Image (cartoon, grey):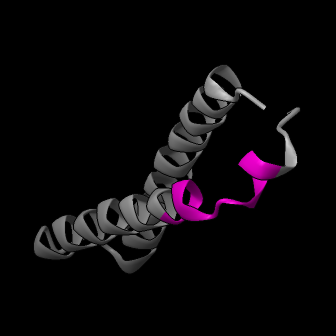
């Protein structure tokens, strides 16, 4: 990850990653809650969803930042 100091300072892309991942995790929790699944299944599915969504978005944001960095 070779980003310049100006691109590394902006926290907004990473805040959006956390917000989007949290919303998708909450929706997953609600879906499994309405399905009356076991609590361990709900926790595992929600944690898995958070990891997958945040990992995918982090990869996307880092590649975009590297590609569009003009410093």
Q: Quadrant of the C terminus?
A: top right
Q: Based on the displayed image, in which of its 4 quarters is residue 70 positioned?
A: top right
Give the magenta-colored segment's residue range: 6-15
- Residue 67 x %, y %: 65, 20
Q: Residue at x 69, y 29 (%)?
A: 69
Q: Give the main secondary structure of the magenta stretch.
A: helix
Left or right: 23 in relation to 64: left
Residue 52, above or below 47:
above
Depth check, front residue: 60 or 38: 60
Q: Residue at x 86, y 50 (%)?
A: 5
Depth check, front residue: 37 or 1: 1
Q: Based on the displayed image, in which of its 4 quarters is residue 22 positioned?
A: bottom left
- Residue 10 included in the magenta stretch of the image: yes
- Residue 44 x %, y %: 49, 63
Depth check, front residue: 70 or 31: 70
- Residue 65 included in the magenta stretch of the image: no
């Amino acid at each position: 990850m070779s980003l310049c100091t100006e691109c590394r300072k902006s926290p907004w892309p990473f805040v959006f990653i956390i917000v989007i991942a949290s919303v998708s995790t909450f929706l997953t929790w609600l879906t499994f809650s309405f399905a009356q699944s076991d609590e361990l299944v709900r926790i595992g599915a929600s944690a898995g969803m958070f990891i997958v969504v945040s990992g995918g978005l982090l990869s996307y944001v880092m590649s975009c930042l590297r590609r569009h960095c003009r410093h």
